[in-house]
Structures are given as structure tokens and as C-alpha cells.
Amino acid sequence: MDGADGADRADETDRVGRAGGADGSPPESRGETVRSTGRWRGVVAVVLLAAAVGVLAQQPALLLVAGAAVVLAAYPLVTATPDPKLSVSRRVTPESPGDGERVQVHTTVRNEGSATLPDVRVVDGAPPTLPVVGGSPRRATALPPGGSATVEYELRARPGRHRFRPATLLCRDAAGAVEVETTAVAESPIACADRLPDLPLRARSRRRTGPLVTDEAGSGLEFHSVAEYERGDPAAGIDWRRFARTGELASVRYRTERLADVVVCVDARPEAYRAPSPTEPHAVARAVDAAGRLGDALLDAGHRVGLAAVGPHASLLAPGSGPDHADRLRRQLATAPAFSLIPPEPASPEADGAGVRKPEADGVEEEKPEATPSLDRRLAEIRALAGSNGQVLLLSPLCDDAAPRVARLLGEEGAAVTVISPDPTTGRTAGGRLARLERARRLRALRDAGVATVDWGADAPLGAALSAAGERSR
């Protein structure tokens, strides 16, 4: 256990989360979970068995053992239920690391109450998009009044803005019979810079001037064609060299630049929660992070941006622009159940060290029945959101054959669809290699169908994947 002086605590006040309260209210009324551990159930069974055998066999020794066991069985009844009043502070060094740099995390839990907590278990909410490469985000300890304990571990930085999840705190009484579970939030975002290149938008949009180059002739910077001069054409657009050479007037046309209505769509179906290994972030975590960064970049460029999810939960945000809309988009990504980083049903509840279900280690998933009517209804809502002249950026790992179908259906009414696919496969296992081949087949099928794709490797920054896709399309 360690302490912290007043100055250190004052410097960290903006990153302190509190669990419990000082108003004397019971833990249940504060949103905490109180449950029995069942630790002493075996003792009660031993008491009853020893007493019954002692009576039937007329063995005083067994009755004496049963009497002693009664005392042990009564012990949990006289211990008080924990009433934790805990604060959590976190220090991250550095806060803006480079790609691949190690980030040190020190999370301190302090007992702000007046009673000793004999058994405190801490699971820090490490960002699911960053792998833990040193130490552990877990710790078990006892905390006297005013005492503290620090969890220390290291993360490997990846490009993007990463947020910690709430720290989970579990407090048991001295007998270990009752436990109180609570959470505390300490805001400590990690920002790793990765400049995004020109985004993969298609040459179509609504008629609002902006940075998107289209195939239409008009005003702009990029040459489109030379056409016969028509009355009313601007003088600045006349090809004077051609006039001097031939005596004929002609106007130079440029590619018109427009603004786009773009819907960023995340594939958050249970089949998409896959990762190369249990220690790596799964594809949905990468997709949600990328959705936020793509949305920010598109809004900064002046485009109107919407948000949607394909999965068990509905989430739709109509295209818009401006600072208030940007805040709504970020808030929806951070809080809406549709973008949860915890896999939905029917995924298995197996959990890793950070409290989130471990994805399949090789990216292979079992075939599950698809709720086609519900999926089709959800896709129809997203198509209506994008409109026939809009654009859809679909973030999907393409882990099953339903994913390409989703991409094709999103473009059914004219919207231009681009699939950005975070790769969740690995070549370390036979199953992983098979999954990689299947995913490559789906990417080829989409390209053959005219759908633009971006293959985003597990170790590649998003900006590099977008740049590589742009080079291939030229």
C-alpha cells in the first residue's frame, strides 16, 4: 500500500472517480451490487451431517465437532456488510504517445471511509483497443481508513483516441460471505496521432460546394474537359491559347467539388467481435474507434456526417454538421449500447483479464442463424438515412458471408458504399489461415461487384490503410 501527498491529489482531481457515498445510504441505493458468495454453504452442510450422524450413532465426539462447526457457520452472520467509500485516480505517461510506444498506467484506489476494508479487488478498465504488454490491471489487497493501493501496468499505443472503461471494485467482508461490487470512472484518454489522408469518398454528392471531387464538369481545380464556348460562360474559363491558335472560342471545364452526406456504419453483430488473439483488440473495438476518427475528419472537411450500427441494438444519427452535431456523434459512439465493446448475445460470456469476453483467437466463428427480417429492416433504415445520393462507410471485419450481403444491400437504392475492413484473422493457426482465405474471398467478391474496399491490417494504422487503398484506386 502506498500514500499520496496533498499536492499530488490536488493535481489529479480532474481524473478522480468515486465509488460509494458518505450519506449513510445503503449500497443498493447507490447502484452497487450486493450478493452472497456462498463461501460458507459447505460448513452448514458439515454441521448438519455431523449432528445427524452423532445423534444416530450416539457419538459425543461428533456432536462436539458439530457444536464447533456451528460457531464457524455463525461467523458470517456477525460480520458487517462492507460499505465501501473508494476513490480512483489514474496517471498515464505519456498521454500522447507515438505509435507502438509503451504507455505506463498507474491507477490508485484510496479508502475514503472510516472502516477497514479487509478484501478489496480491483480490475482497472484498460482501453479495449490497446493490448496490455506489461504488468496486470488486476490487484487484490486490504485497505485501512485512508489507505491506498496502486495497480501498475503497461499498454502498447496504437493510433487513435482511446478511453478507459470504468474500474471495477469488489469489496468483501472479513468472512468472505458477502461482496459489494461497484465501479468508478477516472477520465484519462490516450491520444496517439495518426493523420488520416483524403478519405475514400466516391464521386457523387449533393449540390453543395466542398472538397469532394466529382465527375461533373463545372468550377473546380482539377481539369475535366474542353467544350465549345456558350454564351454566358465566364471569361476566366476561356481557353485563350486555343483561340489564338485556331480563332475558335472554347471553355475549359473543371471537376466540380461538392460536399457529401456520409453515414459511418459499424458492423456490431456478434459475428464481428473477433480478434487475432485474446490479448488483441477485437474488430468492433477498432471499428468504433475508427468511426469516431473518420467522423471528425469528415466534419472538419465540411461534410455532413451521420452514424449507424448493424447489430442487435438500433442506433441512427441523421447526417449533420457543426460542433453540436460532432458532440452528439462522439457521445453516441461512447454511450449507445449499439457500439458496446462487450459482445452481445449469442456470444459466450467468457471473459479476459480486462473484463471483456475474449474474442476467438483465430478469427473463426461458428455459423449462427441470421435474423434476416430484423437485419433487412435495419438496413432499410440506414439506406433511408443515407439517401440515394449519399455515401456509406461500412466498417466490418467481413467475418461471415452475411457481411458482404450487408454491404450490397446498403447500396441497393443508389448510395455509394465503401467497406473499411479491420482484419481480425491470424496466420498462426490452421483455423486462422482458413478464416484469412475466406475473408480475402469476400473482399474480392465485393471489389468484383463494384464496391470499394479498404483492407485494414491488424498492425497497420488506419491512415496507412486508407493511403494504400487510395494508391490502388488510381
Image (cartoon, helix red, strand yellow):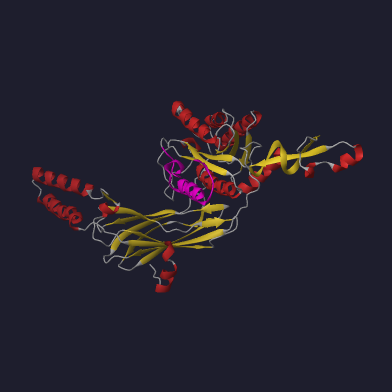
**Does residue 126 appear left or right of residue 116 in this picture?**
right
Number of marks in picture: 0
**Does residue 327 appear left or right of residue 77 in this picture?**
right
Measured as percent of width and height from the top left, residue 126 is found at 46, 54
Q: In this view, does 306 lie above or below 30?
A: above
Which of the pair 101/330 is nearer the observer? 330
| Residue at x 63%, y 49% (from the top left corner) | 196
Can residue 387 be seen in this snapshot?
A: yes
Measured as percent of width and height from the top left, residue 348 is found at 41, 38
Can residue 275 be seen in this snapshot?
A: no
| Residue at x 70%, y 38% (from the top left corner) | 473
Q: In this view, does 423 lie above or below 9?
A: above
**Does residue 200 appear left or right of residue 150 in this picture?**
right
Which of the pair 208/452 is nearer the observer? 208
Quadrant of the rendered image containing residue 4: bottom left
Split into 4 quadrants, where in the image is the C terminus?
top right
| Residue at x 47%, y 46% (from the top left corner) | 333
Which of the pair 48/269 is nearer the observer? 269
**Does residue 197 appear left or right of residue 184 in this picture?**
right
Measured as percent of width and height from the top left, residue 214 is found at 68, 38
Quadrant of the rendered image containing residue 245: top right
Give the magenta part as a residue range.
318-344
Residue at the far front: name it. Answer: 231
Q: Is residue 190 above or below residue 45?
A: below
Quadrant of the rendered image containing residue 465: top right
Split into 4 quadrants, where in the image is the N terminus?
bottom left
Residue 420 is inside the magenta segment: no
Measured as percent of width and height from the top left, residue 305 is found at 55, 43
Residue at the far right: name it. Answer: 245
Residue at the far top: name it. Answer: 373
